[in-house]
Image (cartoon, rainbow, N blue to C red):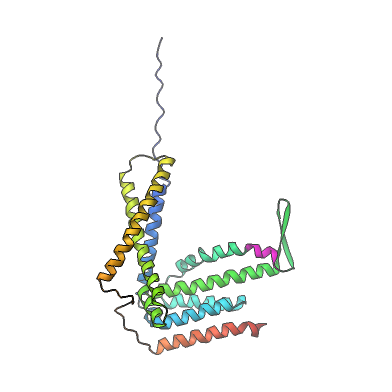
């Protein structure tokens, strides 16, 4: 009997074109940290909005957000959105990344949530959408309500993001205490903000250590098992870390109050910002009655 040698099937090299879940998770964690650091860098720029008193900015943006929530006309919301664009220019921020951050986030999700109202509000039919045994009818009033809702969310989120990008987080918290916001609420916000960085740093270290020790492709079962075990380890570390963080804050003189090196002083441009924002907010709220 003659044995015939069959050549072994060549082993396919690992594809480098696609990133595994470890690489994707590392990229996501690094991106989150980078965005936060980038926001702090924007807040330190020498621009009109960055130089304004944090208390004035909090009053101005809160008034504009409230006015946006009370507005029901798309033309008024368009004017308010133009104000956010002007604020981006006054803060010397990059316009395109700012727009991407807004429209790829909450407004897009709100648009998905509001879709049912397109078919169940109003009575003037526009077009039909057949879905198997039923046919949905989109109405003019539904589309208008959905558009106003999405635009309202986009404008509100734009004002909130603009405030965060042009003001340091510590100054925002200190301004909240100036307006008599409960200390426990400000404390929770401050610790949550700092604690997110610590958890991201811990998770980033776990993923990097795994990536540096893995030399072969892991099966799907092994990857899922590692994810489950990593979640439990991260939770255990988080519980220990929370107590360590609080003890470290107490050791450094923390007494429940937000303390910064900045001294607040309201100047003429700050009062002008507050006056213009309040006047614009009142006008936006009353404009609906004037237009109708």
Q: Quadrant of the C terminus?
A: bottom right
Residue at 45 percent across and 66 percent down: it is 97
Identify whether 227 is placed above or below 11: below
Could you say which quadrant of the image residue 177 lies in?
A: bottom left
Residue lying at the far left of the rendered structure: 251
Q: Is residue 174 left or right of residue 291?
A: left
Confirm whether residue 92 shows in the render.
no
166 to 135, vertically: above or below: below
> Magenta segment: does it hold 118?
yes
The number of numbered badges drawn on the structure is 0
Q: Nearer the viewer, residue 224 or 14?
A: 224
- Tell me the magenta residue range: 115-121
Residue 180: percent from left, percent from top: 41, 82
Residue 49 x/y as whole percent: 41, 79
| The quadrant where residue 38 appears | bottom left
Q: Position of residue 34 (x, y in %)?
A: 37, 62
Q: Quadrant of the N terminus?
A: top left
Q: Main secondary structure of the magenta part?
A: helix
Seen in the image, is 95 located left or right of residue 26? Answer: right
Up the image or down, 220 lies above or below 121; here it is above
Residue 32 visible in the displayed image: yes
Above or below: residue 165 compared with residue 13: below
Q: Position of residue 166 (x, y in %)?
A: 40, 75
């Amino acid at each position: 009997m003659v044995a015939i040698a069959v050549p072994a099937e060549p082993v396919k090299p690992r594809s480098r074109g696609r990133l595994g879940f470890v690489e994707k998770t590392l990229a996501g964690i690094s991106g989150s940290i980078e965005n936060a650091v980038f926001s702090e860098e924007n807040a330190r720029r020498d621009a009109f909005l960055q130089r304004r008193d944090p208390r004035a900015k909090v009053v101005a943006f809160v008034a504009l957000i409230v006015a946006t929530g009370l507005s029901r006309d798309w033309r008024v919301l368009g004017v308010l959105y133009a104000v956010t664009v002007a604020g981006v220019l006054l803060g010397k921020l990059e316009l395109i990344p700012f727009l991407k951050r807004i429209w790829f986030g909450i407004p897009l999700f709100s648009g998905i949530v509001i879709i049912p109202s397109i078919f169940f509000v109003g009575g003037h039919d526009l077009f039909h959408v057949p879905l198997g045994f039923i046919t949905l009818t989109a109405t003019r009033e539904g589309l208008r309500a959905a558009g106003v809702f999405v635009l309202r969310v986009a404008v509100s989120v734009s004002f909130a993001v603009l405030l965060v990008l042009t003001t340091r987080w510590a100054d925002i918290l200190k301004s909240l205490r100036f307006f008599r916001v409960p200390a426990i609420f400000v404390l929770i916000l401050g610790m949550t903000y700092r604690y997110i960085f610590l958890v991201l740093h811990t998770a980033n270290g776990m993923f990097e250590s795994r990536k540096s020790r893995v030399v072969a492709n892991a099966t799907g079962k092994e990857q899922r098992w590692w994810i489950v075990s990593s979640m439990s380890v991260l939770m255990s570390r988080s519980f220990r870390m929370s107590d360590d963080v609080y003890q470290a804050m107490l050791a450094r003189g923390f007494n429940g109050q937000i303390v910064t090196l900045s001294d607040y002083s309201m100047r003429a441009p700050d009062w002008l910002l507050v006056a213009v924002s309040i006047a614009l907010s009142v006008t936006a709220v009353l404009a609906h009655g004037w237009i109708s």
